[in-house]
């Protein structure tokens, strides 16, 4: 017997009786403020996916013995909706996020779901709460799908019940400035054979104490190194890119490969595509080590470095602390106040123009407003 999958035509909507006031956009902090509604879709192994529901945003009732609360059976995503200058709202490559959610869910024995039907339900949620999508350039509506194992059962097999829910958070810039990274080779975010390439909540919790230690030292984030050769992997909230003249004398944009260690970021993939379309320099996904970065800095070959992710968009990196040395990374030598290096800014501007539908692109998925 085939069990029902997610079916957007069965979606029901219950509107809130207590709509929230809109905040001044300038006051939006990342992930602190949520809209009026959420999407919930329940699953049981016996009956498959139930009818999706949009209902007022609020607490979930979860059994204390649920898999998610004991064994971290949880995966999540982050994608965004953007308001274009003409007021229309677009999603940016949501199919990539839902594919990654499917992969992550599969890794932790959560059930398969129909990505296209889920996307239809998400579009409906954004439509219902469209008044919250910010108008200012640089601001957007962060969309957070969470997928959890809800079966109350301590037996360590897998969760035969699940809940996929999605909620929305209007957001401003994550880091409105350059960032300083602390290169950490002592602890590892991910390792060969591990799960660093899946978006599991369980990857983030163990990074919190090391991350807060570097924050207390005046750094923004950790640059995670791996192994004795100090392979430069990623930042945790962002993938990491270097723009340099490599040791062969070639101008190159380089980021870590999809070798199972780093998260396959949607922003990462988009920037690699844009830079490859320019065809102006070499674009590589390959392993780079910290000693190579130090050599490039010492030899004046380092041009720019930046982090890229959905929440953070793109941030220039101005410093890396490595083995007690403060390595100054060039941002824009022609402009000491610059927040972005010239190449980083060009990539960022092109990306934002697509996200805000200024440049037409198949990556931009409109939310039709039939009201
Ligand atoms: C995102 O960029 O969407 C993320 O998930 C980063 C988040 C952990 C702040």
Image (cartoon, rainbow, N blue to C red):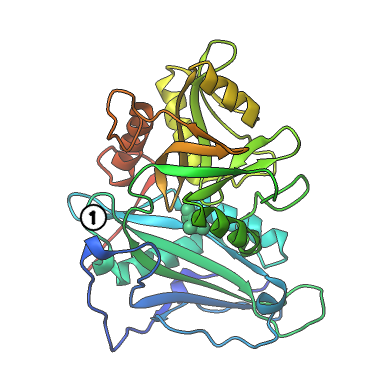
**Residue 20, percent across and down?**
26, 80
Q: Is residue 244 left or right of residue 80?
A: right
**Residue 237, percent across and down?**
51, 51
Classify 333 as above or below 31: above
Mark 1 falls on what kind of element? loop
Work out which residue is located at the far top of the displayed protein and give it.
Answer: 249
State which quarter of the image contains the N terminus.
bottom right
Q: Is residue 91 left or right of residue 70?
A: left
**Residue 358, percent across and down?**
25, 41
**Residue 90, percent across and down?**
32, 53
Is residue 124 something one can see in this rendering?
A: no
Residue density around tag 1, few if under 14, some if 14–19, many if 20 or more, within 10 Å:
some
Please name the residue shown 34% across and 27% down the image: 332
Q: 291 or 34: which is nearer to us?
A: 291
Classify 369 as above or below 85: below
Mark 1 — residue? 88
State which quarter of the image contains the C terminus.
bottom left
Is residue 175 something one can see in this rendering?
A: yes
Work out which residue is located at the far front of the displayed protein and give it.
Answer: 324
Classify 38 as above or below 325: below
Q: 318 or 122: which is nearer to us?
A: 318
Please name the residue shown 63% across and 34% down the image: 257
Please name the residue shown 67% across and 35% down the image: 231
Q: Quadrant of residue 160?
A: bottom right
């Amino acid at each position: 017997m085939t069990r029902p999958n997610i079916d957007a035509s069965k979606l029901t909507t219950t509107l809130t009786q207590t709509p929230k006031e809109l905040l001044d956009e300038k006051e939006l902090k990342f992930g602190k403020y949520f809209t009026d509604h959420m999407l919930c879709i329940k699953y049981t192994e016996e009956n498959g996916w139930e009818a999706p529901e949009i209902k007022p945003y609020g607490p979930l009732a979860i059994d204390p013995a649920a898999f998610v609360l004991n064994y971290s059976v949880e995966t999540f995503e982050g994608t965004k909706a953007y308001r274009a200058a003409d007021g229309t709202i677009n999603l940016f490559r949501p199919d990539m996020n839902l594919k990654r959610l499917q992969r992550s869910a599969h890794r932790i024995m959560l059930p398969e779901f129909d990505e296209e039907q889920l996307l239809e339900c998400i579009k409906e949620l954004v439509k219902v709460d469209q008044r919250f999508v910010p108008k200012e350039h640089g601001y957007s509506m962060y969309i957070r799908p969470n997928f959890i194992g809800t079966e109350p059962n301590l037996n360590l097999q897998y969760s035969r019940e699940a809940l996929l829910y999605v909620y929305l958070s209007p957001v401003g810039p994550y880091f409105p400035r350059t960032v300083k990274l602390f290169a950490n080779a002592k602890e590892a975010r991910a390792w060969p054979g591990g799960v660093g390439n899946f978006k599991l909540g369980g990857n983030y919790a163990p990074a919190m104490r090391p991350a807060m230690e570097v924050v207390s030292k005046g750094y923004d984030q950790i640059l995670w190194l791996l192994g004795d050769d100090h392979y430069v992997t990623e930042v945790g909230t962002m993938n990491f890119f270097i723009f340099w003249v490599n040791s062969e004398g070639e101008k190159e944009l380089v980021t870590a490969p999809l070798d199972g260690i780093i998260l396959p970021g949607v922003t990462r993939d988009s920037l690699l595509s844009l830079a490859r379309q320019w065809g102006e320099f070499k674009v590589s996904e390959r392993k780079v080590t910290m000693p190579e970065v130090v050599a490039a800095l010492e030899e004046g070959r380092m041009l720019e470095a930046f982090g890229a992710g959905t929440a953070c968009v793109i941030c220039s990196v101005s410093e890396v602390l490595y083995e007690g040395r403060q390595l100054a990374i060039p941002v824009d030598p022609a402009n000491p106040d610059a927040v972005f290096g010239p190449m980083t800014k060009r990539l960022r501007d092109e990306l934002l123009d697509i996200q805000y539908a200024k440049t037409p692109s198949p990556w931009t998925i409109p939310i039709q407003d039939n009201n």
